[in-house]
Image (cartoon, rainbow, N blue to C red):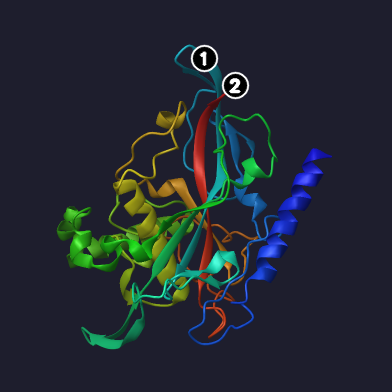
């Protein structure tokens, strides 16, 4: 009964926030749009899998999964345990060209009343004889430990605890606005700003689409483009889905570089989180929640860099659905009791 009451409260809160926000009703060109994420129907629950014990997948899945520690038993200090591997929904992200647009909070727009962070999309411009668009995006990052606060699994120390909260707003970050200032946290970008390094990303594109991204090619975001600069300025914008996924990948990398986000996968993650200033792309999956939730199918929660050919259909609605929302799934290896 406790679980049922908790579930009812969550659904009522979701409905209340959705009805309380007038932004969606006023949807139109230039307006913030979106819908509150329903924790039941808008989640790709099959993205939890596979679940493994050591190298054995006890709950298999057709979705690609990075390698897990081979041995089923582990030891953290003097505490023995079982080496578990699973995927956990831990963050929500708004990705929009409109400042202060909270897509996953029902399309609510919080205008502070001063000119800051206004972005745009421009193009096409002729570069090297080809047509190329430019776009610029903002990101809002939420804590969203869904499994924990819904109490789907109780007394499991491996789960991230907490409640829904806004952790980061890019509009007030000067490094997110200016590509020159961004060089403070990614000075190595100059080494990969050449045709050869960018051409090599084709291999990462294929690997990301077929299986998993190549972590060693950390400067690549697969089929989406380059991880540099670590901000919301996309110089080669193909469409809303491609550009927003590239920006979200860069943002996740930025958090790792700033030591805000840490590593949770592999043998090093069994006894707790660890520093990962160079992000391993295989640690994340991005599931679309807005404008249309991707809740099933092979490409519902693809890894970083996977081709958007099979993800773009129905994901952008002109004028009333151009603000993107994502649920971030994170690979976790943990020494469970």
Residue neighbourhood size for the residue with mark 2, other residues' Cα within 10 Å, grouped as few (<14), some (14–19), many (≥20) = some
Q: Secondary structure at mark 1?
A: strand
The answer to whether residue 229 shows anywhere in this view is: no
Give the Cα distance between marks 2 and 1.
8 Å
Quarter of the image that includes the N terminus = top right
Numbered tag placed on residue 337 in the rendering: 2
Of residues 274 and 87, the one nearer the viewer is: 274
- Residue positioned 46% across, 26% down in the render: 271
- Residue positioned 20% across, 62% down in the render: 181
Of residues 196 and 140, the one nearer the viewer is: 140
**Horizontal arrangement in the rendering, residue 95 relative to residue 327 (left or right):** left
Question: In the image, is residue 46 above or below residue 127?
Answer: above
Where is residue 37, by image quadrant? bottom right
Q: Secondary structure at mark 2?
A: loop
Question: In the image, is residue 191 above or below residue 312?
Answer: above
Residue situated furthest front in the rendering: 113
- Residue positioned 57% across, 72% down in the render: 107
State if disc 1 and disc 2 touch (CB < 8 Å): yes
Numbered tag placed on residue 87 in the rendering: none
Where is residue 50, by image quadrant? top right
Judging by the rendered image, the residue that carries numbered circle 1 is: 79
């Amino acid at each position: 009964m406790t679980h049922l009451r908790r579930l009812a409260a969550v659904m009522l809160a979701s409905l209340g926030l959705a009805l309380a926000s007038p932004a969606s009703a006023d949807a139109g060109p230039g307006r913030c749009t979106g819908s509150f994420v329903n924790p039941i129907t808008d989640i790709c629950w099959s993205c939890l899998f596979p679940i493994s014990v050591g190298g054995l997948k006890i709950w298999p899945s057709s979705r690609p999964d990075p390698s897990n520690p081979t041995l089923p038993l582990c030891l953290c200090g003097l505490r023995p345990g079982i080496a578990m591997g699973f995927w956990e929904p831990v963050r929500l992200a708004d990705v929009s060209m409109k400042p202060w647009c909270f897509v996953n909070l029902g399309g609510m727009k919080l205008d502070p009343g001063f000119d800051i962070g206004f972005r745009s999309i421009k193009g096409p411009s002729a570069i090297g004889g080809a047509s190329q668009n430019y776009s610029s995006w903002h990101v809002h990052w939420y804590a969203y430990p869904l499994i924990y606060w819904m109490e789907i699994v109780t007394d499991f120390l491996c789960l991230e605890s907490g409640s829904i909260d806004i952790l980061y707003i890019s509009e007030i970050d000067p490094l997110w606005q200016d590509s020159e200032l961004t060089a403070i946290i990614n000075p190595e970008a100059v080494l990969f700003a050449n045709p050869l390094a960018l051409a090599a990303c084709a291999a990462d594109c294929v690997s990301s689409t077929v299986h998993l991204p190549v972590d060693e090619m950390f400067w690549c975001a697969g089929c989406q483009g380059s991880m540099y600069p670590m901000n919301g300025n996309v110089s080669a914008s193909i469409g809303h889905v491609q550009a927003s996924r590239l920006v979200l990948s860069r943002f996740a990398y930025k958090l790792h570089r700033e030591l805000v986000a840490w590593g949770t996968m592999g043998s090093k993650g069994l006894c707790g989180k660890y520093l990962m200033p160079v992000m391993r792309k295989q640690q994340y999956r991005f599931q679309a929640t807005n404008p249309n939730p991707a809740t099933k199918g092979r490409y519902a929660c693809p890894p970083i860099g996977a081709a958007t050919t099979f993800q773009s259909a129905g994901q952008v609605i002109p004028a009333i659905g151009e603000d993107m929302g994502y649920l971030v799934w994170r690979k976790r290896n943990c020494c469970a009791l």
